[in-house]
Amino acid sequence: MQAKRGSKFSYWFGEKAVPHIVLFTYMLIALFPIVLILINSFKERKAIFKTPLAFPNAETFSLDGYATLMERSNFPLYFTNSLIVTVVSIFLILFTGAMAAYALSEYKFRGNAILGIYLALGIMIPIRLGTVGILRLMAAMGLVNTLYALILVYTAMGLPLAIFVLTQFMSQVPRELKDAARVDGASEYRIFWLILPMVRPAVATVAVFVMIPIWNDLWFPLILANGEKTKTVTLGAQQFLGQFVSDWNAVLSSLTLAMIPVLILYLIFSRQLIRGLTAGAVK
């Protein structure tokens, strides 16, 4: 019996069944590690290794990991440091990158394409290749063991992607709108702020893509800001991983708390993220 068009049955089992089933499967695969870390953070150490896939019950439930975080580490400070570095870096990346993208897309001059390629080279060349030079530069500026060093490095790391993506989106804004604004006497800064909401999906996409490497990064906090007052969440969780003994309860608890901001950001920008990724794919 053929399902009625538009019914819930046809939505999941009709002509479009395969894409929905595939999407649902991808969601399960993506969420499985998150759920696994979450449920094991509330279990005793023996239960983590004996029954890692089982949910905690009255016998295995334990909050030892979260208690260890509060007793043996300054986790609230680590969380605050990561939040400050991530939020400030994303703001600088989006603001500076959007202004550079507007200039590249709006003003055509000799060397425009070459300059755009030069600014986008950071996507292909990993910034970690210059770790030694960056460390020497930060030491000369007196910024070692400060959050300013991390903010500067992450801003430089995220700008190439922001400029590349936003330039493509801003170039698609109708020029007639900008010319009409100029006729009405709007300044270039005013036109920039008028265009920015039109590329909101691209801005949200860039924000999500640059946040993940910044929040989860271990390399630069270990090199540039490994002091107790400047540790980030990822670096702070490493103190529970030793050569001979590892406190897995504390590690899983710290990872669970560290995932909260990332999940919140995805929930907030999910619709804009999908629009930014699929823009131009369907006519």
Image (tube, rainbow, N blue to C red):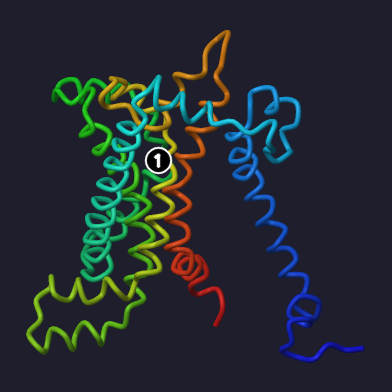
Near-viewer residue (52 or 47): 47
Residue designated by label 1 = 215
Q: Residue 159: horizontal and vertical position, in percent?
A: 31, 49
Q: Is residue 255 above or below residue 101?
A: above
Q: Amino acid at mark 1?
A: Trp
> Would you identify the image quadrant in which residue 141 lies?
top left
Q: Which residue is at a point 30% across and 50% down the rendered structure image? A: 90
> Would you identify the image quadrant in which residue 178 lies?
bottom left
Q: Is residue 152 above or below residue 132?
A: below
- All told, the count of numbered labels is 1
Q: Residue 112: horizontal and vertical position, in percent?
A: 26, 61
Q: Residue 209: horizontal and vertical position, in percent?
A: 43, 52
Q: Residue 142: horizontal and vertical position, in percent?
A: 14, 22
Left/right of residue 5 with respect to residue 176 in the rendered view: right
- SS at badge 1: helix
Near-viewer residue (106 or 22): 22
> Would you identify the image quadrant in which residue 45 lies?
top right
Residue furthest right as drawn: 1
Where, quadrant-wise, is the C terminus in this rendering?
A: bottom right
Q: Which residue is at a point 25% across and 47% down the rendered structure image? A: 88
Q: Which residue is at a point 55% across and 19% down the rendered structure image? A: 247
Residue furthest top as drawn: 244
